């Protein structure tokens, strides 16, 4: 069976275990159903997620021209503390920025390789945690805009990591943490502007990923250079496909690549 289309990050469904779906323009694949089956990935061409042209992908699924032009790739996406829509100040497209920035956001703690702090729109809970491969997570602050979430994250990352070690996450080299205790420990470091939004009482969310075999020494597949890869799919975690030979493929990092997927 063959599928062909442009890669975008896998959609997910919060079940036990999490269900993953690779979406194409006119079709989709339930990736969980491919576990323990031989899968071949073949790179065909590029397709920028904005302009649709066959141009090398620069970042986030966009060609270089689009990346430095469109609001979906502006600096405040990765650095929410740079958000300015609450000041009615435009970066690239004020209408888009208001739509995204002026909605409830959550500052959270997630444990994927270690405890880290992060920011996401409230509507993206628990999807954001799934994408990061976190096996447990908890909201600690819920604020009305992206700017407040951003400055809270900046303050807290002085005291807790804001990075995930992807190799440790994929090897499942992790330990359980008491995120409620972490939340209480970090409470005093929340900026004054966000203190009233602290979540006093909630419990952590636990996530189960569909993995039959974790890699001992994960090695990342560069499909643009190798062009074709075949292997037996053994797991899915975060946005990674995990294969029997320890090869791992980050779907999200390869957005904008048109691929052929063959299942035998």
Image (cartoon, helix red, strand yellow):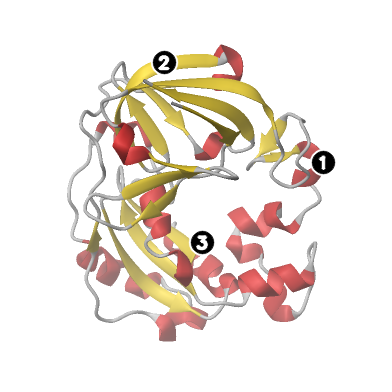
The residue at which mark 2 appears reads as 230
Quadrant of image for the C terminus: top left
Q: Residue at x 27, y 24 (%)?
A: 215
Q: Residue at x 55, y 66 (%)?
A: 150
**Rendering coords of residue 91 (x, y %):** 78, 64
**Rendering coords of residue 251 (x, y %):** 49, 36
Q: Nearer the viewer, residue 42 or 219?
A: 42
What crowding class fits label 2: few (fewer than 14 Cα within 10 Å), some (14-19), or many (20 or more)?
A: some
Specify which label sits upstream in the sequence, 1 or 2: 1
- Which mark is on residue 65? 1
The residue at which mark 3 appears reads as 154
Q: Nearer the viewer, mark 3 or mark 2?
A: 2
**Rendering coords of residue 139 (x, y %):** 34, 69
Q: CA distance from mark 3 to mark 1?
A: 29 Å
Number of disc labels: 3
Question: Is 62 situated left or right of 127 in this image?
Answer: right
Question: Is 164 situated left or right of 234 in this image?
Answer: right
Q: Residue at x 55, y 25 (%)?
A: 260
Q: CA distance from mark 3 to mark 2?
A: 42 Å
Q: Secondary structure at mark 3?
A: helix
Q: CA distance from mark 1 to mark 2?
A: 33 Å
**Rendering coords of residue 1 (x, y %):** 43, 26
Q: Is residue 232 above or below residue 63?
A: above
């Amino acid at each position: 069976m063959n599928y062909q289309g442009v890669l975008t990050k896998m959609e997910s469904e919060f079940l036990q275990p999490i269900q993953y779906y690779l979406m194409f323009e006119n079709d989709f694949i339930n990736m969980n159903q491919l576990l323990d089956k031989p899968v071949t990935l073949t790179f065909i061409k590029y397709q920028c997620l904005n302009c649709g042209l066959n141009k090398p992908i620069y970042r986030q699924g966009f060609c270089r021209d689009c990346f430095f032009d469109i609001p979906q790739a502006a600096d405040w996406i990765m650095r929410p503390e740079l958000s300015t829509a609450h000041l009615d100040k435009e970066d690239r497209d004020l209408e888009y920025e208001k739509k995204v920035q002026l909605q409830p956001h959550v500052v959270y703690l997630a444990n994927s390789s270690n405890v880290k702090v992060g920011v996401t729109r409230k509507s993206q809970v628990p999807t954001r945690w799934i994408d990061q491969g976190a096996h447990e997570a908890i909201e600690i602050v819920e604020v009305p805009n992206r700017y407040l979430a951003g400055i809270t994250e900046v303050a807290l990352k002085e005291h807790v990591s804001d990075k995930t070690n992807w190799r440790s996450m994929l090897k499942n080299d992790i330990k359980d943490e008491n995120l409620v205790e972490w939340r209480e420990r970090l409470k005093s470091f929340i900026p004054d502007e966000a203190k009233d939004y602290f979540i006093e009482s909630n419990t952590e969310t636990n996530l189960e990923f569909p993995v039959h075999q974790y890699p001992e020494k994960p090695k990342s597949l560069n499909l643009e250079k190798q062009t074709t890869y075949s292997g037996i799919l053994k797991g899915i975690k975060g946005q990674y496909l995990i294969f029997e030979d320890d090869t791992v493929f980050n779907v999200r990092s390869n957005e904008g690549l048109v691929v052929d997927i063959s299942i035998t």
